[in-house]
Image: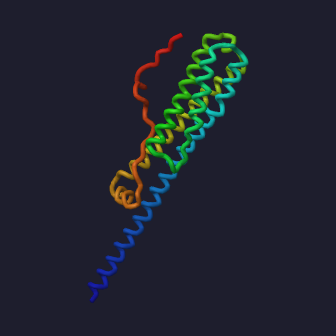
Amino acid sequence: MNNKRYSGYIIGAIIIFIGIFLMVTYNALVKKEEQVKLQWNEVQNAYQRRIDFIPNVVNVVKGQADFEQTTLQQLTEARAKATAVNITGNEITADRFKQQTTAQDGLAAATNRLLITVEKYPELKGAAAFKGLQTQLEGTERRIKVARKDFNIAIADYNSSVRSFPTKIVAGVFGFKAREGFQADAGADKSVEIKF
């Protein structure tokens, strides 16, 4: 009779332990998933800063110099493409992620072409307004780099939890899946050749 009662206590304790484990693990995964979303919002914020800032650079350049309109046109078109692709925290899928990354990389490349073109025009390069905007643009690119790095750290932390045992069991039961972070583009390991 006592053995049945003790075995009942033991089974009850095991069930309570499993319930607490599931609850704590689930809450930890939710917290890490929310951290991923928060970091993605920081990336979006940095992208938006770049998008908002580009028209100012274009206007200063137009006002200071009369040069290759194609460069300014490409920059404006790249900005329009980058503005068209926006991902919220719930839509972070590999395909949508790659779409936005491609659009933002196109905007960054167009901005870099503008800065290279400006090197040909000393009167523009020396303009105080352009120097200030160039500094702001460099700061924006740094913010994007930091936001991407922080996003990758949050993804790595989340993925390590989702893939490690015994959390992997809880993640599988509740539908938590590993996610993909930022990766270098193909050929990013080679230096960029700049021609004038």
Quarter of the image with the N terminus is bottom left
Colour mapping = rainbow
In the image, 61: left or right of 3? right
Q: Quadrant of residue 172?
A: bottom left
x and y, in percent, of residue 76 in the image? 62, 27
Q: Residue 41 at what x, y percent from top left?
A: 56, 44
Is 146 rendered above or below residue 127?
Answer: below
Screen quadrant of the C terminus: top right
Q: Is residue 49 left or right of residue 196?
A: right
Q: Position of residue 113 (x, y in %)?
A: 56, 19
> Residue at the location (51% across, 50% down)?
90
Depth order, front residue of 22/88: 88
Residue at coordinates 61% horizontally, 22% vertically from top-left?
A: 73
Residue 63, given in percent of the width and then of the height, sits at 73, 18
- Going 66% across and 31% down the picture, which residue do you hit? 53
**Is 142 or 44 nearer to us in this picture?**
44
Residue at the far bottom in the pictured view: 1
